[in-house]
Amino acid sequence: MKVKRIRKAIIPVAGFGTRFLPATKSQPKEMLPIVDKPVVQYIVEAAAKSGIEEIIMVTNSNKRAVEDHFDYAPELENFLAKVGKKALLQEIKAIPKLANFIYVRQKGPYGNGTPVLNAETLIGDEPFAVFFGDEFFAAKQPWMAQMIKVYEKYQASVLGVMRVPKSEVSRWGIVSGKEVEPGIFQITDITEKPTPEQAKSNLAICGGYILMPEIFAILKKTKIGKGGELWLADALATLLKKKPIYAKLIDGTYHDAGTVQGWLETNVALALEHPVFKDNFRKYLKGLKLN
């Protein structure tokens, strides 16, 4: 049977970004810059490099800036052409061409299961990806492509995972299972935000999901979980009783731009790799007199 290609990805961007207030009072957290690009652009670029053609953004009324960023900007483009900034002009013109962008408003309870349900009619009966607008991996091969490769081999749902300290498992959905080949696990258990005592491993779900369309029917029957929210991990735990699910230990460096501390660290890490800024920024850091 021919394996259906992963063509579509859902990116939930409807959260209020309360960890970044007051900065996010009028600015979506997904649009906060990592050096010289908004964080969500890193996710979209990785998706495009992984062969994804259609990006479904699940938004709210405060996310107009996200939509504008991935749209054409004729006035800006004309200005850049007029002043002769050709390289920057080409960079700006390339952004809307990364994918076909579709926007839907989030309706329903909080939690990462709701935006998936909101995009059901746009996905249809295809397998699809879910990635988040505030986390990504720096890797030679995009982390999404790594996950898609596992999906293509096993023809099943795939979760991106990384190892976290046991003391931090309560922040994550945690999976455990049998390692069927290096860095690939067939999952036997999924638990949303367990205590360190409850956790059966330290493999944390991060970087996103490759999901089969049957997840929609399961999500509709999934009870509201921890914090009064609808969790994908709870729906996947139900799916696991019927179908195999795999986890891919992502080869790359994880960047969390969803917390202030993580966002600051990500800016420093990527500034030290930036082809334009890295040398002067390194000199600046070395010159700091830190206690």
Image (cartoon, rainbow, N blue to C red):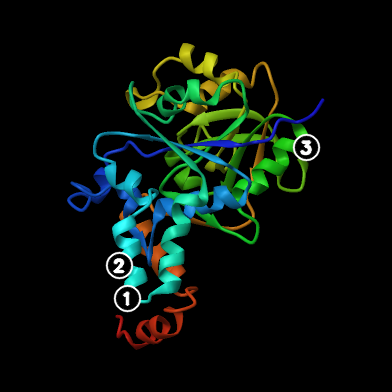
Q: Quadrant of residue 160?
A: top right
Mark 1 or mark 3: which comes first in sequence? 1
Mark 3 or mark 2: which comes first in sequence? 2
Q: Marks 3 and 2, Cα distance to the nearest angstrom?
A: 48 Å
- Which of discs 3 and 2 lies nearer the camera? The answer is 2
Residue indicated by mark 3: 153
Q: Marks 1 and 2, Cα distance to the nearest angstrom?
A: 6 Å
Which three-letter amino acid code belongs to the residue tagged 1? Answer: Val
Residue indicated by mark 2: 79
Residues tagged 1 and 3 counted as in contact (Cβ below 8 A): no
Question: Image check: 68 left or right of 242?
Answer: left
Residues tagged 1 and 2 counted as in contact (Cβ below 8 A): yes
- Which of discs 1 and 3 lies nearer the camera? The answer is 1
On the image, the x and y values in percent for residue 265 come to 39, 64
- Front residue of 278/8: it is 8
Q: Quadrant of the C terminus?
A: bottom left
Question: Image check: 144 left or right of 280?
Answer: right
- Front residue of 208/8: it is 8
Residue at x-position 46% and y-position 27%: 116
Q: What kind of element bears circle 1?
A: loop
Which three-letter amino acid code belongs to the residue tagged 3? Answer: Lys
Residue at x-position 70% and y-position 29%: 156
Bin the neighbour count of mark 1 within 10 Å (Cα to Cα): few under 14, some 14-19, many 20 and up.
few
